Amino acid sequence: MPSLEMRSLREAYGRALAECGAQDPRIVALTADLGDSTRVAEFGRRFPDRYFNFGVAEANLMGVAAGMAMNGLKPFVSTFAVFAAGKPWEQIRQTIAYQRAPVRIVATHAGLTVGEDGASHQMLEDINNMRVLPGMAVVVPADAVEADRVTRWAASYDEGPVYVRLSRANFPTILDEDYRFTFGRARVLRDGGDITLMACGLMVSVCLQAADLLAADGIAAQVVNVSTIKPIDRETIAGCAARTGRVITVEEHQICGGLGSAVCEVLAETCPVPVRRIGVDDQWGQSGEAMALVAHYRLTPERVAAEARSLLAGG
Amino acid sequence: MTAATTLPMDLDQLPAKARQLRRDIIEMVYRARSGHPGGALGMADFMTVLWYRHLRHDPANPRWEDRDRFILSNGHTCPILYAILADRGYFDRELLWTFRRLGSPVQGHPSVRSDLPGIEYSGGSLGNGLSYALGTALAARVTGRNYRVYCSVSDGDCQEGQTWEAAMAAAHHAVDNLTAVVDYNRCQIDGPSDQVMSLGDLPAKWRAFGWHVLDVDGHDYQALDEAFRAAAAHRGAPSVIVARTVIGKGVSYMEGDYRWHHGFPDEERYRQALAELAEAPA
């Protein structure tokens, strides 16, 4: 999407976190040897007494964050998604989610767009792992603007734990600077009556491009940014499905357990319509340049448009 | 704010108090027909020293922000904690007899979700508690409070890698408002820990991780009392009291027998246990 500015979500996060930290002395930032990569190091430079590096020890990282959150602090915990939502899942379950500890887990480097590091570092199961936990909020910003807004929202959210999924790669900036994030609400970014494209993260911009391709064929696609995956916005999702009668979900995640599953759970109970789920289909990632991987795993506007035409044709 | 913390009990009153708590442990497990009496009985002496002489707390104000925190990492031993909390007045003693029942706040493993006053931490999965205690201790540093954090860990906790992650981090961050107590009874579910998975030279391990180590008889009130005092006075590093305990202490047929990690006595053995734990002759 050459016409849109490519911006870093983790840069937006790190900057917003430091700004929040200047206003709220209860905010602390924790990492496990990935302060620079996740961009929380900026917070550490400004507030060294509120910045804790625990080395390569993610189980302890999560347990410490829980203890801090239950004793008056607002911890933001950042590492790569594979080390945040995979390795210490048990600690997140036992000490964070079960105790309703308001820990903000902001994971970067999720999905295929990690790129050259390959499958060991390409977390494609984190939405699944986090959304199954009772009371865990799961948010996937679509671009740097939303990453900024979600960070500021998380700083003020004390109801329970939050998982925020960010990327390594820069994403096209699709939201205006006056965009306001509303926790728990999916947002229709483009209206259309023929088919609904629901996406999160990078795939929101992919769906906007797909909608352009479909428009050239005279097909009006509705595009929905489902940035809050839990609690899922049942009302908007069911309303959109009722309007168009066909839904495609697109995510940089396994199609099992992620956005597509969450949407299907809602639609099966509220508005059963034909659905196609696009994502990584029970496969592992591999090394490669980020956008080459997106193309290799067919998470492209062309693929989304083709699936839409197929679904509309009753295929 | 300040609070009227409980006054320390005289050292010579502690044995009778520990016997009373042990009777409650037996009663809870017997009535629940399940639970983990062995560790709870073994911990009763160091828990009595801690809770009746060292921990600054206020049962009338369980959320007092400057209270010392007690984190039970080995959550299965919770009958001793519940017995103490009830005795100190955190909640109605009658609740003890609802231990492990549906709907009871006296859960099989302690749960902060139950809102039972005095419960700081939802233990149960070994290895997690010391990290939580470390976070709690670091929070005091950031918020400018001067409370101490005590964390009980078991042999099983010490087999979990996470405990050593936490040990490394507590020393690295020079967290000296943290005291860990190892209930070192050398037993675990499947057998003696030296047969299942030996901890080797446990005090040396803690020393190697940079901790101030106090190696004591876990049933010697005087030694425990001095150890807790020395731990609190130590600066620049976390302290650990390696309390050498006997599983099932106080009930003859349970002492030293790993099979009493969990289980409940039949009626005859229940009566025997209570008799052995009756008010001791002067």
Image: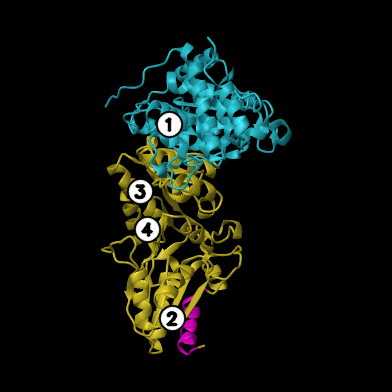
Chain colours: A yellow, B cyan
Disc 4 designates what residue?
A: A147
Q: As rendered, which of A117 and B102 lies closer to the eye?
A: B102
- Where is residue A157 shown, x and y percent of the image? 32, 51
Label 3, residues with CA under 10 Å away: few <14, some 14-19, many ≥20: many
Q: Indicate which disc, 2 or 3, sits on the residue closer to the N terminus.
A: 3
Real-space CA distance between mark 2 and mark 3, rounded to the nearest whole angstrom: 41 Å
Q: Which residues are magenta?
A: A299-314
User: Are discs 1 and 4 both within one chain?
Assistant: no
Label 1, residues with CA under 10 Å away: few <14, some 14-19, many ≥20: many
**Do callouts 2 and 4 mark residues in contact (Cβ within 8 Å)?**
no
**Do callouts 3 and 1 mark residues in contact (Cβ within 8 Å)?**
no
Q: Looking at the picture, which amino acid does disc 4 mark?
A: Ala
Per the image, is B52 magenta? no
The numbered mark at residue A273 is 2
Disc 3 designates what residue?
A: A17
Taking the image as drawn, is residue A300 in sight? yes
Q: Indicate which disc, 4 or 3, sits on the residue closer to the N terminus.
A: 3
Which residue occupies 48% across, 69% down? A261
- Where is residue A291 shown, x and y percent of the image? 51, 68
- Where is residue B70 shown, x and y percent of the image? 45, 30
Query: Which of the two marks, 3 or 1, is nearer to us in this view?
Result: 1
Q: Secondary structure at mark 1?
A: helix
Which residue occupies 55% across, 42% down? B125
Q: Chain of mark 4?
A: A
- Where is residue A61 shown, x and y percent of the image? 49, 42
Q: As rendered, which of A106 and A265 lies closer to the eye?
A: A265
Q: Chain of mark 1?
A: B
Where B249 falls versus A89 (above or below)?
Answer: above
Q: Secondary structure at mark 4?
A: helix
Disc 1 designates what residue?
A: B137
Where B248 falls versus A173 (above or below)?
Answer: above
Real-space CA distance between mark 2 and mark 4, rounded to the nearest whole angstrom: 31 Å
